[in-house]
Image: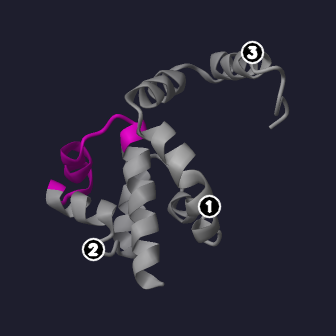
Amino acid sequence: MGNDIDVHLGKRLRRRRRLLGLTQQQLAGTVGVRFQQIQKYECGANRISAARLWQLSEALEVPVGYFYDGLSDQARRETASEAEGGEMFARKETLDLIRAYYLLGERPRRRLLDLAKSLNGGEHADA
């Protein structure tokens, strides 16, 4: 399962980096490695040490636990959501929307989220 964990952490790393609009080169410069190392982390070819994971979490403004989120139920989720969620988050339009959303302050973000939920017929209004 070691390799599965490395791949999972790499996917989470790539997702967060892209959400923040960072290149591999920019992230690499922040944590003091070459961009090739970031590539290897993201594809799971190289393991991320505890110290490096800490640096990455600081650079990406997430807790270390972010990288492990969903690990226990990864296999179940991959089969169901890889097709729908993976494709959705790979779209440029989705990434642009998420970036714009996080540039807003907390109150406008909450109002935008409420608006989006109301446009969807109120489903998951309290989620």
Instruction: Identify the mark nearer the N-term, 1 or 2.
Output: 2
Most frequent secondary structure within the magenta stretch? helix
Residue designated by label 3? 119
Q: Name the spot of residue 97 as percent of width and height, x first.
A: 49, 23
Q: Which quadrant is the C terminus positioned in?
A: top right
Q: Name the spot of residue 117 as percent of width and height, x first.
A: 75, 23
**Range shown magenta:** 18-35
Is residue 62 shown left or right of residue 15? right
What amino acid is labelled 3 in the image? Leu
Which residue is at 58% across, 70% downward? 75
Q: Is residue 26 magenta?
A: yes
Residue designated by label 2? 46
What amino acid is labelled 1 in the image? Arg
Is residue 107 shown left or right of residue 64? right
Distance (Cα) linking label 1 and label 3: 27 Å
Residue 47 vs 101, above or below: the answer is below
* Colouring scheme applied when the structure was drawn: one colour
Residue 111 vs 20, above or below: the answer is above
Which residue is at 55% across, 57% downward? 66
Distance (Cα) linking label 1 and label 2: 24 Å
Viewer-closest of 85 and 71: 85
Residue designated by label 1? 77
